[in-house]
Image: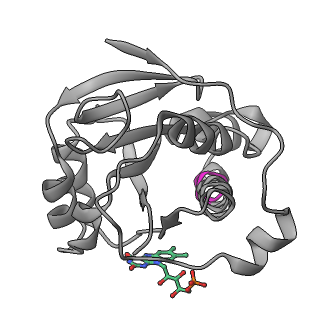
């Protein structure tokens, strides 16, 4: 099942400088669902990060809770070209994800969570061991785009690096070659 996302806005209500100034990590979320437009905008922003040698080692997954996103059912979705959601696994996985993230249970309150995964070989096959460094740098770029886009949309997020890699991979039924690097719960802040 595939869901086409909406066209991203290229002009926002918050300046880049304001977004940079206001950005901070926010860990309390309302139950309010995110709109399809907000979700589309965030996914678009994630796809606009630079990539070493244009090797693009990252993939973006989205955990969506029950009644958490406009017109989109609960499940784990794999983004394609940062403009389409493809259902990867059914069900509301938020609690299991929060537990896998060292019981940081506020993750289960957020309507959606982004999970940025890496397939290292796409970059290491060109750059050898140094490619590992490049992949980690790149994840930071994607995460910062999501942070700033959240700020511009009036949404809350926090970068989560503390989790059991194997547990997150199992909860999400990720292919063996896909390694989770970052989790970012997103929602309307409390
Ligand atoms: C690599 C990395 C990993 C992080 N992991 C977590 C985490 O697991 N849980 C959490 O609540 N915050 C996490 N954070 C957020 C930091 O705690 C936060 O950025 C820091 O306290 C500074 O606050 P600010 O983002 O509001 O400026 C992480 C941040 C980074 C950069």
Tell me: 83 left or right of 85.
right
Relative to 105, is 98 above or below? above
Image coordinates of residue 140 in percent, x first then y, are 63, 61
Relative to 96, is 11 above or below? above
- Residue pictured at 35% horizontal, 69% vertical: 29
- Residue pictured at 63% horizontal, 52% vertical: 142
Magenta span: chief secondary structure: helix
Residue 23, image quadrant: bottom right
* The C terminus sits in image quarter: bottom left
Relative to 80, is 35 above or below? below
* Residue 129 magenta: no
Q: Nearer the viewer, residue 163 or 89?
A: 89
* Residue 133 magenta: yes
Tell me: 100 left or right of 87.
left
- Residue pictured at 59% horizontal, 25% vertical: 6
Q: Nearer the viewer, residue 126 or 81?
A: 81
Image coordinates of residue 12 in percent, x first then y, are 79, 50
Q: Is residue 184 visible?
A: no
> What range of the chain is rendered magenta?
132-136
- Residue pictured at 38% horizontal, 34% vertical: 70
Image coordinates of residue 71 in percent, x first then y, are 35, 27
* The N terminus sits in image quarter: top left
Residue 5, image quadrant: top right
């Amino acid at each position: 099942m595939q869901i086409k996302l909406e066209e991203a806005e290229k002009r926002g209500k918050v300046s880049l400088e304001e977004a940079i100034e206001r950005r901070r990590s926010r860990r309390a979320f309302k139950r309010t669902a995110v709109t399809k437009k907000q979700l589309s905008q965030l996914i678009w922003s994630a796809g606009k990060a630079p990539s070493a040698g244009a090797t693009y080692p990252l993939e973006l997954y989205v955990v969506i809770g029950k009644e958490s996103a406009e017109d989109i059912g609960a499940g784990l979705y794999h983004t394609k070209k940062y403009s389409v959601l493809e259902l990867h696994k059914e069900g509301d996985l938020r609690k299991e994800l929060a537990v896998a993230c060292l019981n940081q249970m506020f993750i289960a309150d957020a309507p959606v969570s982004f999970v940025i995964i890496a397939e290292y070989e796409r970059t290491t096959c060109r750059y050898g061991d140094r490619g590992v460094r490049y992949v980690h740098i790149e994840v930071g770029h994607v995460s910062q785009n999501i942070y700033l886009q959240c700020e511009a949309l009036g949404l809350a997020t926090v970068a989560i690096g503390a989790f059991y890699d194997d547990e997150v991979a199992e909860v999400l039924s990720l292919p063996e070659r896909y390694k989770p690097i970052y989790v970012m719960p997103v929602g309307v802040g409390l």
